Image (tube, helix red, strand yellow):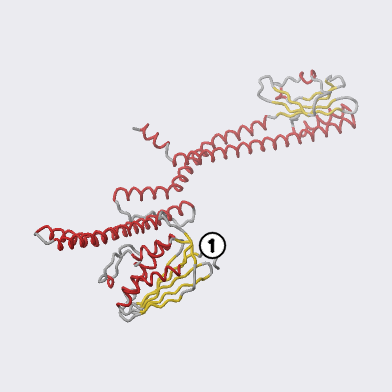
Amino acid sequence: MSLKFLDLTRKTIGFRLTLWYSAVFVLSSLLFFALAYFFLSVSIQQKDREVIQSELEGYIAQYNEGGSNALQQEVDLQKDLSGKNPFLVRLAGPENETVFLNIPDKWAAFDLRKLEKKDYRNKGHWLYLKTKNNQDILEVALQRLSDGSVLQVGKSVANRTELLDRFNKIFAAAILLVVFIGLTGGILFAVKTLRPIRHLLSTINSIIHTSNISARVPTRHTGDELDEMSIAFNTMLERIETLITELKMGLDNVAHDLRTPMMRLRGTAELALQSEQPEEVLREALSDCIEEADRITAMLNTLMDITEAETGVMKLNLEEVNIVTLIEEAVDLYGYDAEEKRIKIHTTLPEELYLNADGIRLRQVLSNLLDNAVKYTQSGGTIGIEAFQKKQQATVIVRDTGIGIPVEEVSKIWDRLYRGDKSRSQRGLGLGLSLVKAIVQAHQGHIEVSSEPGSGSLFSIHLPLLTAPHPSR
């Protein structure tokens, strides 16, 4: 069980983030300590060499003034003043024979005879001499004098080594603390970084198990990418919830609107089957059944058209279309219905206004708007249709003096199968305006509405003009 838990933990992002953070922190600390050790070592070595060089220059000055006797007196004087002389002082002749030698008592482990065996003619300014057991090193500076002699001054590096060893021990103890801090910081970093993702997963799991689409991811308002992800996810949930709500309402409306024609169709068929009827009555019953079936088919086809337009898969047969001609055809089509209700239709149209559009689909748009205008305008009212060019757009306005739309329903008229209270008395599917908006948007245009109850409504369609001028213009 523990091995399985460790294996699962190892695969988590939090575990990998912790390891990465800890590794970066520990390696950075190691690099810092390594650089500190290097600079400390170089600094101490430089200081020791400055001290040795200073002593060498002092002894050279004494030798140049009084020879080896003056050098001996200077060494004895330092012994008398400090009680000891921590420096090796050796004067070698031209053949590297020892002329004068001063050795601190504690340096018995050094084999100083090696100095007599070395040839310094091609050597550098500094040389090192190790003890027999390699536990200490003697750092020696040398200088060839004007008479061919060589003066050597040396000092043990034991103090330097001891200081660096102490530093290493401190570092060894500190590295454990560094590893602990790295792991702790890595865990805190992973927990804090992944908290929005955990909230997201928690919300997703809650929705999966409870089907409660109203759950939301907590946001921190930090403005970072993870917070933006949470906000975007909440926005997506809100849209999904809205779509589901609209879908439920749409299905309810579909069920309600389909129930009536289905019951009529069934009732007509049952009535025709229950008794022997003349052929004319049976034909009339079949005609009524076909009418109801056509109404159902029209509803389903319209729903499919709306879905295709909204999802961008509606096939548009784009061509050069004079929208003025389409408006005139729609006015002729609904002119008879308008005359029956004593409604006057006024048009203000240019001679031509060309678009790159699907003429059949635009006829549906204009027909639906005119049908609604005639349907909801009282007897004796007026309908005005206007078309004009504004910048790179063609604008079509349909204005009526009908019953108008209540303020609270203006934003809902584009919803599928929505029918306001005042429109329930009129025969219809509640899909006309949804289809109008979907087709206009499929043509990269938009539609607007303004209305006042009792004073009428105004619909304005805005569509892009044909990019290339028509040859007749």
Q: Is residue 373 above or below residue 269?
A: below
Q: Residue furthest left?
A: 275
Q: Residue furthest bottom?
A: 380
Query: How many callouts does the rendering have?
Result: 1
Q: Is residue 61 above or below residue 280?
A: above
Q: State the residue at coordinates (29%, 50%).
A: 210
Q: Is residue 280 left or right of residue 214?
A: left
Which residue is more in the foreground, 346 or 39? 346
Which residue is more in the foreground, 349 or 255? 349
Q: Is residue 36 above or below residue 364?
A: above
The residue identified by callout 1 is 467
Rendered location of residue 378, percent (x, y): 31, 78
Q: State the residue at coordinates (29%, 51%).
A: 211
Rendered location of residue 110, percent (x, y): 72, 21
Rendered location of residue 49, percent (x, y): 75, 34
Rendered location of residue 128, percent (x, y): 74, 25
Label 1: state its secondary structure: loop
Q: Quadrant of the C terminus?
A: bottom right
Which residue is more in the foreground, 279 or 87? 279
Q: Residue 60's image quarter? A: top right
Q: Quadrant of the N terminus?
A: top left
Q: Is residue 349 above or below residue 34?
A: below
Q: State the residue at coordinates (34%, 79%).
A: 343
Q: Residue 2's image quarter? A: top left
Q: Residue 139's image quarter? A: top right
Q: Residues within 10 Å of mark 1 (few under 14, many from 20)?
A: few
**For the residue marked with disc 1, what is the amino acid?**
Thr
Which residue is more in the foreground, 183 or 140? 183
